[in-house]
């Protein structure tokens, strides 16, 4: 089984308010991510925050560790429910092509998008190695982690990534 994990624990400082709850086409950004992942995953989780109607998991080993803390939380949660892989998506990318998520979900080995490395597929067996990396690598770089675990980069072309209210307005 693949766990779909929405990484949503960031502070959204550039956005200025709760980015995950911001509306795009009448739905919260987190709901867009959950819907996209739900088409490819047997279970869902929101990492780094609570969200109504969906299980949540904390960042690991602590909050405010960036995307890798969210990924570590997702992998830990996945192991606890018996999932073999985790497909990750940030709450700020509402227009990810279905074919791209299907391609990632079909992979057995770690892979991430070249331009948006928070989107990827990760075997849950990497959980202990990632938790060690998060606490020992001072940069907590997703690309550094990808190199460490042998993840391959996937070219996807430009995708809308919402960091500011202006980014969201441009999509509308």
Image (cartoon, rainbow, N blue to C red):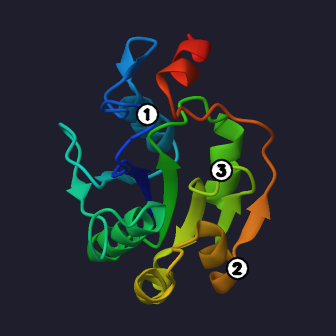
Q: Nearer the viewer, residue 166 or 51?
A: 166
Locate residue 93: give its quadrant. Answer: top right
User: x%, y% of residue 87?
Assistant: 52, 57
Residue occupied by mark 1: 35
Identify whether 128 is placed above or below 4. Answer: below
User: x%, y% of residue 78?
Assistant: 35, 69
Q: Earlier in the sequence, mark 3 or mark 1?
A: 1
Q: Nearer the viewer, residue 58 or 137?
A: 137
Residue occupied by mark 3: 116
Alpha-carbon neighbours of circle 2 within 10 Å: few (<14), some, or many (≥20)?
Answer: few
Rendered-image quadrant of the N terminus: bottom left
Q: Residue at x 30, y 69 (%)?
A: 77
Q: Residue at x 77, y 63 (%)?
A: 153
Q: Earlier in the sequence, mark 1 or mark 2?
A: 1
Q: Is residue 5 visible?
A: yes
Q: Residue at x 60, y 29 (%)?
A: 95
Q: Are marks 1 and 2 in contact (CB under 8 Å)?
A: no
Residue occupied by mark 2: 147
């Amino acid at each position: 089984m693949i766990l779909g994990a929405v990484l949503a624990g960031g502070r959204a400082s550039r956005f200025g308010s709760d980015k995950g709850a911001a509306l795009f086409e009448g739905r919260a950004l987190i709901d867009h991510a959950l819907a996209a992942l739900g088409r490819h995953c047997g279970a869902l989780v929101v990492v780094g925050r609570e969200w109504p109607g969906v299980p949540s998991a904390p960042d690991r080993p602590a909050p405010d560790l960036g995307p890798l803390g969210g990924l570590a939380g997702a992998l830990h949660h996945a192991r606890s429910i018996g999932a073999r892989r985790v497909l990750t998506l940030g709450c700020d990318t509402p227009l990810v092509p279905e074919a791209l998520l299907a391609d990632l979900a079909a992979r057995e080995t770690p892979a991430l998008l070249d331009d948006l490395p928070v989107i990827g597929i990760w075997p849950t067996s990497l959980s202990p190695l990632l938790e060690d990396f998060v606490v020992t690598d001072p940069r907590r770089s997703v690309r550094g982690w990808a190199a460490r675990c042998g993840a391959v980069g996937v070219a996807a072309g430009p995708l809308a990534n919402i960091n500011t209210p202006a980014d969201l307005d441009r999509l509308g």
